[in-house]
Image: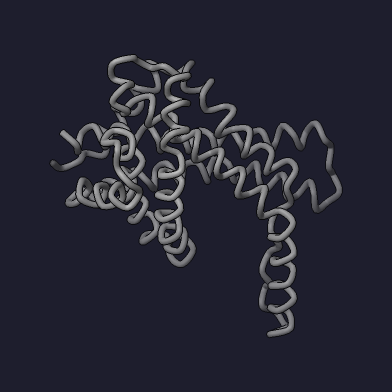
Amino acid sequence: MKLDFATVLTDAWALFKRDRDLLLRTAAPFLFLPAFALALVVPDPPMPPDGAGGGEAQALAWADQVTAWASTNGGWYGLAYAISFFGTSLFYALYLDGQAGRQGLDVAGAIKRSAAQFPRYLLAMILVSLPAGAGLLLYAIPGLYILGRTMLTGPALFAEAPIGAFAAIRRSLTLTRGSGLPLMGLAAFSYISGWLIGQPFMLVDRWMRTSGQENPVVLALVDAGAAAAAMAAGLAMALIAVSAYRRLAR
C-alpha cells in the first residue's frame, strides 16, 4: 500500500485533537521533564575547534574535553533518553497494543505493558538510532531516510507482540517498502520542525550562559520553551508512526 504524506498527518492530528488532554499529561513527565532538566542543568558538550590554527594539538585538546564532559555528564544524557524512549513507547501501548484495543486508552495499563516490553524496545531504538544518527551527522538525507524506513519498529513491537527487536526492525523495513520517500518526509517534518522551533530557545540559552546574563527565572523559561519544542516533536513523531502503521499494516 502506498502512503500519502497529507493523509498520515491528518490522521495523526485527528488523534491529537481527540485525546489532547491525555496525551499532554502523559508526555509531560516523560518527554518534557527530561529535556527540561538537560537544558537547565547539564552543560552542553564542548564545541569543536574552528580550524583556525592549532592543528593536531587543538583537536587533541578538544577530544580530551569531550571525554571529560562525557565521563561527567554522559550518564545523565543516557538516563534522559531512556526516559524519553519509555514515554514514546507509552503512546504505542495506548494505541496499538492488542489489549489496548479492548480496554481503550488506559494509561495505567499502558505503563505496565510498556514496562514489560521496554528492554526489547530500548534495544530496538539503540539499533535504529546508531545508523540514523550517523546519517544525520554526515548528511541529513540518509539519516532521515533511515528514520522513515525504521519508523514502524516501535509500533510493530506493540501491535504484533510477542516480537523481538531485530524482528520488529525487519517488520518495519517490510511494511515501509515502496513508501520510503513519504516516510522520509514525515520524519523530516517532525525532526526539523522540532529543531527549528527549539533552536531560538537554545541560542538564547547559550548567549545567556556565555555572556554572564544568567537570570535564573528567564533561563528556566527559555529552557522550558526548548523542552516544549522537544516534547512536541517527540509526540508528533509517535502519532505519525501510529497513523502510518495503521495504514500500512492493513
Q: Position of residue 218 (x, y in %)?
A: 77, 33
Left or right: where does residue 157 sit relative to residue 231? Answer: left
Placement of the C terminus among the 4 image quadrants? top left
Name the residue: 55% across, 34% down: 31
Against 149, is 54 above or below?
below
Q: Position of residue 87 (x, y in %)?
A: 50, 33
Q: Given the current orientation, which residue lies at the most extreme right position?
A: 212
From this viewpoint, is residue 6 visible? no
Q: Quadrant of residue 146?
A: bottom left
Q: Quadrant of residue 240?
A: top left
- Front residue (pair 39, 198): 39
Q: How is the image coloured?
A: one colour
- Front residue (pair 241, 155): 155
Name the residue: 83% across, 42% down: 214
Name the residue: 46% across, 46% down: 122
- Front residue (pair 84, 16): 84
Name the residue: 46% across, 53% down: 126
Placement of the N terminus among the 4 image quadrants? top left
Q: Position of residue 151 (x, y in %)?
A: 34, 45
Against 127, is 11 above or below?
above
Q: Given the current orientation, which residue lies at the most extreme left position?
A: 1
Q: Position of residue 8 (x, y in %)?
A: 27, 33
Left or right: where does residue 71 sit relative to residue 149? Answer: right
Left or right: where does residue 53 sit relative to residue 163? Answer: right
From this viewpoint, is residue 152 visible? yes
- Front residue (pair 140, 120): 120
Left or right: where does residue 133 sit relative to residue 174? Answer: right
Q: Quadrant of residue 45?
A: bottom right
Q: How many marks?
A: 0
